[in-house]
Image (cartoon, rainbow, N blue to C red):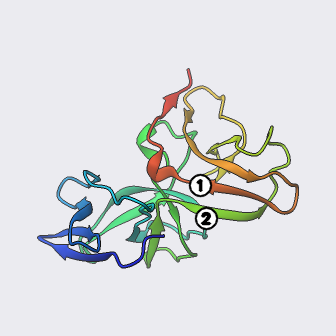
């Protein structure tokens, strides 16, 4: 995670700066987009994005921006889902910690998930996909008609009880629709 990065609200947009004061990430609230025209050299950028939860969310669940909460002036995030008919519902972030419905939480662009069963993966480095269960992930690509296939991470430890995956949906925007 990047240290010494400053963030602030500017003209209704959440802006992140590097230590030199350069803009590295901007959440354009009017257009509901993230602008990443700049990058930090020498270290990864993993922004913490504040949001309002559309439902109860658990740490590590995959989420996407589903709307805007005008009262709290924050995006609303819902659970990502590969079997949804709308590919826009694919993962954009990972919920950083458990958050209750209508409460403010934080989402991150990448997160290491440990203590999971990854034994069915072919090997370390195998892809992880958005799952057909809302908020979840899968070690195999969805195959049902209308499903969206989105690689959102990789297996970092292959094991039935101490497995680990690195989720990075923020950096994975390629989505293919089945059937």
Mark 1 or 2, nearer chain start: 2
Element at badge 1?
strand
Rendered view: 25 above or below 81: below
Rendered view: 90 above or below 2: above
Q: How many marks?
A: 2
**Residue 136, position in %: x, y?**
64, 53
Residue 50: which quarter of the image?
Answer: bottom left
Q: Residue furthest right?
A: 160
Q: Residue at x 64, y 29 (%)?
A: 144
- Whether residue 118 sits left or right of residue 8 in the image: it is right
Q: Residue at x 83, y 63 (%)?
A: 162
Identify which residue, 23 or 47, lies in the foreground. Answer: 23
- Whether residue 120 sits left or right of residue 149 in the image: it is right
**Residue 11, position in %: x, y?**
11, 70
Label 1 close to label 2 by CB (< 8 Å) = yes
Quadrant of the snapshot with the C terminus: top right
Q: Nearer the viewer, mark 1 or mark 2?
A: 1
**Residue 86, position in %: x, y?**
44, 38
Element at badge 2?
loop
Structural crowding at the residue carrying mark 2, measured as other residues with C-alpha within 10 Å and reported as few (<14), some (14–19) or many (≥20) = many
**Residue 131, position in %: x, y?**
64, 45
| Residue 60: assigned label | 2
Identify which residue, 174 or 101, lies in the foreground. Answer: 174
Residue 29: which quarter of the image?
Answer: bottom left
Identify which residue, 113 or 76, lies in the foreground. Answer: 113
| Residue 167: assigned label | 1
Q: Residue furthest top?
A: 179
Q: Residue at x 49, y 57 (%)?
A: 63
- C-alpha span from label 1 to label 2: 8 Å
Q: Residue at x 76, y 46 (%)?
A: 124
- Whether residue 139 sits left or right of residue 76 in the image: it is right
């Amino acid at each position: 995670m990047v240290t010494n990065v400053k963030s602030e609200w500017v003209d209704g947009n959440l802006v992140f700066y590097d230590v030199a004061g350069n803009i590295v990430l901007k959440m354009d609230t009017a257009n509901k987009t993230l602008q990443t025209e700049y990058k930090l050299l020498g270290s990864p950028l993993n922004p913490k994005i504040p949001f309002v939860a559309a439902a109860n969310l658990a740490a590590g669940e995959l989420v996407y921006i589903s709307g805007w909460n005008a009262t709290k002036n924050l995006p609303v995030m819902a659970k990502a889902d590969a079997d949804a008919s709308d590919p826009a519902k694919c993962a954009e972030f990972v919920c950083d910690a458990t958050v209750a419905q209508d409460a403010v939480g934080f989402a991150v662009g990448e997160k290491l998930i440990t203590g999971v069963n990854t034994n069915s993966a072919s090997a370390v480095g195998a892809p992880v996909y958005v799952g057909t269960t809302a908020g979840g992930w899968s070690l195999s690509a969805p195959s049902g008609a209308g499903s969206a296939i989105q690689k959102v991470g990789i297996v970092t430890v292959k094991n039935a009880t101490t497995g680990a995956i690195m989720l990075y949906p923020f950096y994975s925007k390629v989505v293919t629709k089945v059937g």
